[in-house]
Each structure stands twice: as structure tokens, then as C-alpha cells.
Amino acid sequence: MTSYPLAKCAIFLCIVCGGITNTAIALDTYIEDTDRFPGWKGELPSVAHAEYTDGSVGYGEVGKEIWRGKVEQISWEPRAFLFHNFLSEEECDHLINLAEGRLRKSTVVDSKTGGSVDSEVRTSSGTFLNHHEDDVVARIEKRLGHVTMIPEENGESLQILKYINGQKYEPHTDYFHDKVNSDPSHGGQRVATVLMYLTTPEEGGETVFPMGSPKVTGPEWSECAKKGLAVKSVRGNALLFYSLHPDGKEDTKSLHGSCPTLKGTKYSATKWIHVGPFNTGGVKANPGGCHDTNDRCEEWAAWGECDKNPGYMLSGCRKSCGKCEDSSSRANNANGGVGIGQKGLRGKVLSVGNGGQ
């Protein structure tokens, strides 16, 4: 496994075109489209260092939610990356305290009906937190949207899980096998999962990918973990892995499970992320004219993503990238006002440069 800091940004799931009849074109297309899959290479969005005209310095709307840290490549098959110290000690404790008293026996999704059912496959206890339940939860959810580069509204509410006394979750996939949950009106298929570890159990509790490689070895791993590629539950770390390929097909190698927690207690927080906005009635209709397709387009444009990731930005964020003008902007420019692309985050005029990594 290789450790490295990563900086380049990519945005949104798109279709990989391939073929053997024209290798050069297919390769170029593949490189372009995998660059546009969020985090497909384990990258983090670049930080925009905003210097405002009033002399203040900041990081725009993201503020303290920006996370810069060590990203470890765990696997390419499935695509999996470990964010070290993603949560603070205080944030871990806060999530645990919110969940205590609300925990109930965990259920699984019925592959035929799409409903929740009890199963010995999953023996943990858990609860869902409300979206933006408090300032701490809101900060974490915004941070998740930032590092995954997938809109925050595509995510389900955080689920807190507790494992004790040999409790486990047998290997499973996070993408849906039923048409109800994967319907576009519910956000479509799950594309990625982030597992945040809130405690470090004394023994066991690893996340194992039975179809991943290389298999782990050594006395520090449980027998369950040795059945595949595994990641230890370490307090504060977060594991990001993808359930879909860039072409939208399910990645069967994303099969994973939670090994029995043999000693101590394992707490985790799960964020499942969908292809589209989750339970909001599906993707919003194109309003036509000069517009952005995401509320964060202005923020991304300020980070310089129009130049770094033109594949998505010049189609999804045309207004913020200055590739079109609406009627109000034309009138403003005619009167000597501020042009498109000049108005900074929080309504201030700014200049943008690359921030430190």
C-alpha cells in the first residue's frame, strides 16, 4: 500500500467509452472520464486561498470543514482510500454520545421488496442521525461532501453502528439489488461509502474485502480479516470505497464485511452516497438558459476548477465559469458592474491562488 498526499480535483460520475477498434481514442476517453469520477484516483480537491479586497483571508464557504491530511491508497480493486485522522477525538465522542440511548438492532435490506428486515447476517446495533442534526454533524457532513467531491445532498443520513461481544456484519455489497431503493427518485444507486471509525477495538472489528488483494497476514489481524484485504478500525480514520465503476456498473469486488469485534467496542459512522440527490425526487430539471447545476459551482469556480476540471465544470457550472451570461449579468456589465466570475464567495470580490497542501 502506498501513502501520499493528493491534491487534484475531479467531479461527478460519467460514462467510460472504450473499444479495441481505436485504442488511442478509447484510452484518451477513459483517462478523461475517470478524471471526472469523484475521487476515483484518491485525490482531494485543491484548496482555494481566497484573499479578499478588504484585506481578510479565508477559505470561502467551506471554512473549517476543509480537511487536509494523509490519504492512503488501500486498493484499486475495489477503489478504496483511507483518510487518516479525518475526525477529531471530540467529534468521535460527540457522535457516540448522540447515538447512545437510540441504538436498536440493525437490519438489512430485503433484495426483493427493498424493505428492512432482521437478519443474523448483521448483528450490530445502530441508529440514524438526522441530517445536520447539530453543528458538529453538519460540519462533518459538509467535510464529507468536500473530500468525496460529490454533492452533499447525494448522501444518506449518518448511521452510527455499535459492535460488541463478537458482533459482526457478514460480507455484502452496498449497491442495491432491488429497483425500489435504486430508483432515480430516491437518488439512484449507491456509488460510494465512507466508513468513519469512532473507536479502536482491542481485537477484531476490521473491515474486510474478501475479493480484494493482497490478503493481509500477521498476528495483528483476526482470522476473519485474513480472508481478504482488510482495514483496521482506528479511531478518527475514515475509509472511502466505491461500489460502482465509472461506467455505472456495479463493482462486485466492493463486497465487504465487518469482522467480529472480539475484544472491546467498535463504533462506526457510515455515510452512503448516491449517484443523484437522495430522496429529493431525483435530479432537478434543467431550467435552461445560463445556469449552474450545483449550488457549489461558484465555490468550485473560485478554487480554479473551471481550468482544472473543464470536463464537468464547463457543462455543469457554465454560469460560474463565465461561459454564458444571464440577463441580469448582461445588464450589470452594461452598467459597469461586476462581471461573471469576479464575485467571490460570500459576495466578496477575491483573487484565487493555489493553497498549501
Image (tube, rainbow, N blue to C red):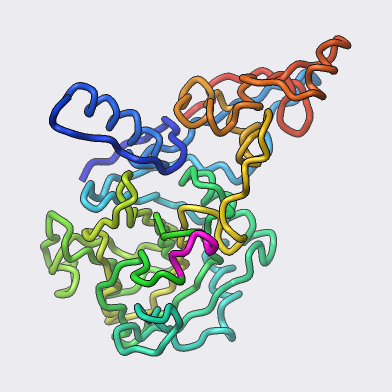
Return the x and y of residue 50 as percentages of the image width and height: 65, 25
Seen as rendered, the residue at the extreme right is 335
When the figure is inspected, residue 175 is found, relative to residue 327, above or below; the finding is below
Task: Between residue 223 and residue 11, name the one nearer to us.
Answer: 11
Q: Please give left or right for residue 178 compared with residue 31 in the image.
A: right
Return the x and y of residue 223 as percentages of the image width and height: 14, 74
Image quadrant where residue 32 sits: top left
When the figure is inspected, residue 64 is found, relative to residue 33, above or below; the finding is below
Q: Is residue 68 visible?
A: yes
Q: Please give left or right for residue 330 compared with residue 102 in the image.
A: right
Q: Is residue 350 visible?
A: no
- Asked if residue 272 is among those painted magenta in the image, a careful observer would answer no
When the figure is inspected, residue 152 is found, relative to residue 123, above or below; the finding is above
When the figure is inspected, residue 350 is found, relative to residue 38, above or below; the finding is above
Image quadrant where residue 201 sits: bottom left
Image quadrant where residue 112 sits: bottom left
Part of the protein shown in magenta: 181-187
- Asked if residue 185 is among those painted magenta in the image, a careful observer would answer yes
Return the x and y of residue 100 as percentages of the image width and height: 56, 81
Name the residue rendered at 31%, 74% in the picture.
202
Return the x and y of residue 269 as percentages of the image width and height: 47, 67
Name the residue rendered at 43%, 61% in the picture.
196
Name the residue rendered at 46%, 59% in the picture.
188
Task: Between residue 357 and residue 343, name the one nearer to us.
Answer: 343
